[in-house]
Amino acid sequence: MIYGIDYLTHDVVHFMVSRGENYQTSVSFFQSLKLLGYPLKALVCDDNQNFQLACRRTYPKAVVQICHNHYQENIRRILAVRSESTYRPFMFEVENLFSKRMSSIEFFTIVRRILLKYGTDPKCQGVLLDIEKRKEVLLAYMLDKHIPRTTNLIECFNSHLEGRLKSIKGFESIHHAKLWFNAYFIRRRLKPFTDCTGRFKQLNGKCSLEIAIQNQPQFQALKEKYR
């Protein structure tokens, strides 16, 4: 099940049920999103090339930001830092590099410092070269203050969804799965937020559909329809 959440409103803008995350499925997702009239400006996702290519095909002007958490986890796996200590000091430096929002000058100053310290090691070189090669999708957040660096928001939604799915042994068909997810997301969009913090604290007491529509009569009509 593939779905997208608007960062500023926390609203579920679209979902689809598919048998895999291949390129054609990804294109179908973004084409449906465009038909709905959603003005996508930036995509924040994990390191799925199919999703990124499909986004650029459908929304050529949208920028793509790779989730820093997913990217770092890939590096940890490559360097095997959880089972071996050899590259843990280097990984600590990389984690510091992705620890906060910063300017491009500050970012590459830290990169150069890491390169001077670990540049003779082939594996460290490979990681730093990949960062340089993929800086466009790793540093897209610098283009706009509203672009997040991680997919933490949707991961939070995923945790809640996985909790609900634990009690379900399975679906009889794709059709039944779509019906269940449709009902689930309608409920989520009409349920007021209670646990938002920081910059999103003002969302508490409101539901995402109410914030997204910004038209009280229209929202109330929808609310009555799905009550």
Image (cartoon, grey):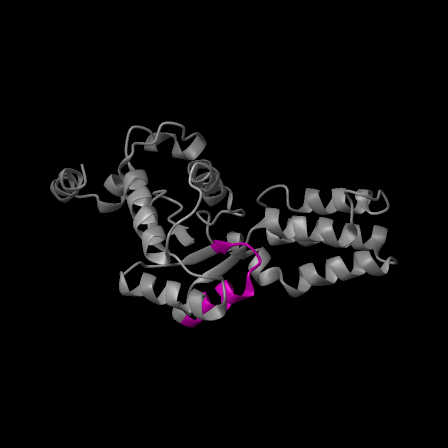
Q: Is residue 28 above or below residue 113?
A: below
Q: Image point 68% across, 54% down: which residue? A: 108
Residue 70, percent across and down? Answer: 60, 50
Residue 176, position as x, y percentages in the image: 33, 52
Q: Point out residue 193 in the picture as x, y percentages from the top left corner.
A: 34, 31
* Residue 149 sits above or below residue 164 on the image: below
Residue at image position (76%, 46%) is 91
| Viewport quadrant of the C terminus | top left
Quadrant location of the N terminus in the rendered image: bottom left
Q: In this image, 62 relative to 72: left or right?
A: left
Residue 46 part of the magenta-drawn span: yes
x, y percentage for residue 102?
A: 59, 46
Q: Main secondary structure of the magenta part?
A: helix
Start-end of magenta stretch: 44-57
Q: Quadrant of residue 85?
A: top right
Residues 150 and 110: in front is 150
